[in-house]
Image (cartoon, helix red, strand yellow):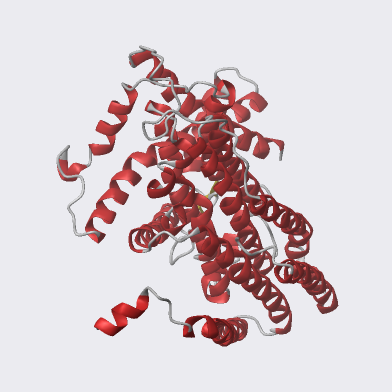
Amino acid sequence: MALQWAFIGFMFLIGLALPSAAIIANQIIAPRKPSKTKSEIYECGMETVGETWVQLKGQYYIFALIFLIFDIEAVFLFPWAAAYDKLALYMVLEGVLFILILAGGLLYAWRKGALEWV
Amino acid sequence: MVDLFSGIDQFLKDLLIGLGLQPAFVAVLLKFAAAAVLGTISVSLAIVLIWVERKLVARIQDRLGPNRVGPFGLLQTIADALKLLTKEVLIPDGADRIVFRLAPLLVVASVVAVWAVMPLAPGLIGSDVNVGLLYVISIGAVGTLGVMLAGMSSNNKYALLGAFRTVAQMVSYAVPMILSLLVPTLLAGSMGMAAIVEAQGQFPFLLLAPLAALIFLISSIAEVGRGPFDLLEAESEIVAGYHIEYSGMTFGMFFVGEFVHAFTISALTAVIFLGGWQGPGAQAYPLLGLLYFVLKTSVVYFIVIWVRGTFPRIRIDQMNAFNWKFITPLALVVLMVTAVVDKLAVGGGFTRLAFHLSANGIIVLLTLVALRVYARATRQAQQPAEEIPSPVQQPEAAGG
């Protein structure tokens, strides 16, 4: 089993190494003539005004929050689904009840208007 | 089972142990070699994929596509890569240099790492961990993180807007994706990728759970950020989105990451819903299984390109409404109904198939009815507003 996980680790390392190699090769081959204009931030030819970190819509934050709820739900549901073959009908119905409670949460967010993009 | 790959594995093992190395060390070394080969192949795939996509999109738009460099323009991608290699790598003022450099690496690595658990042929799988699907989801989130980091470290407003949109889109669409992946998990009774393919010996899960397959394909297209969901790099709105400040190969790596990711989700769809390497004669000849896998993946990849070439980009409010008000509730319903129906369908084989197909049919019908009711309610709510003629429209109406 440890070998299986080692393979995944190796794959991730290869995935990091290949683009690194390409980017390093790029930096060796490519010319390097830095100038002030070149390293300016691109904004359709104009100079940028003010801070980059503009205030963002609160909506993004709300969606991230709703996502978090459902993502944690998945952690609970995956073991239930993986053990499905061994479950009796009432255990399946308990899982359905759990999903229904979550659907209630989604419905609540919907009725509260949290899903509207304003 | 004797096949080409285990033969090579055995040969190398014997050779290295014969050289006087420790067997445990040889095992790790061979795993590393296999990972290097698989990783390099999956990254190099981009060269072919970019050509295929450009050709197909060109035919959809009634153009010829690349046809100058090499036969049928096959070498176009290599020429492009060489050009990118000679371009200067720029880092804008005020950028977070470490994060800026890390982001493209993460995007590629997250895609390559998915191939570690991809069952390519019978017995040919990099790493058959028992949490395969959960791993696929979590490693996909690393790619999303890479995109976010790219947008946030660039110190550019367009890039930052792209990162915001990533939060709204890629993160949201992970929800229906996870929910639709729960369906094959409970049908197969396992999260392991090899076990899921094994469970599709009789019927592919596309037949048992067509709605889940559709939801998975849509949400994973959104997860890649292409097709109608390319809001995070929408050219006409935020120029190039998160990778606007990247140049040379750092940009090229985002490009490679996106194309290989699109192919990877096609492969995932093929494995999870179309039966992967399953097909007549695949058990006896593993290479035939590999061929089936590639064929099924290509079909799904063609559909992904087709969708990209024919659908207009959707607005961000439409995208969110589509996800949270349509796909996610639908995925919840599909999951619940599948869980109950699969327990009730006592007879295996075709009885089970009939149960699942009719359950999916009923869900589709009810969804259509619900949409009709919803559309009528919305139209009635908007009616009074439309009856008041606006002063601008009146002269036109009189003239006509």
Compared with B308, B22 (above or below) is above
Q: Which residue is more in the foreground, B303 or B318?
A: B318
Q: Where is residue B185 in the image (x, y as percent from the top left)?
A: 66, 63
Q: Where is residue A104 in the image (x, y as percent from the top left)?
A: 78, 72
Q: Which residue is more in the foreground, B344 or A111?
A: A111
Asked whether the viewer can see residue B316, the reply is yes
Q: Position of residue B229 (x, y in %)?
A: 47, 56
Residue drawn at the location 67% of the way across and 55% of the way down: A63
Number of numbered labels in the structure image:
0
Q: Which residue is more in the foreground, B240 or A53?
A: A53
Compared with B50, B348 (above or below) is below
Compared with B12, A102 (above or below) is below
Compared with B266, B346 (above or below) is below
Quadrant of the image containing the C terminus of chain B: bottom left
Residue drawn at the location 65% of the way across and 21% of the way down: B22
Residue drawn at the location 73% of the way across and 71% of the way down: A111
Q: Where is residue A102 in the image (x, y as percent from the top left)?
A: 78, 67
Relative horizontal placement of residue B382, taking residue B63 as reference (left or right):
right
Residue drawn at the location 78% of the way across and 67% of the way down: A105
Relative horizontal placement of residue B180, taking residue B233 as reference (left or right):
right
Asked whether the viewer can see residue B204, the reply is no
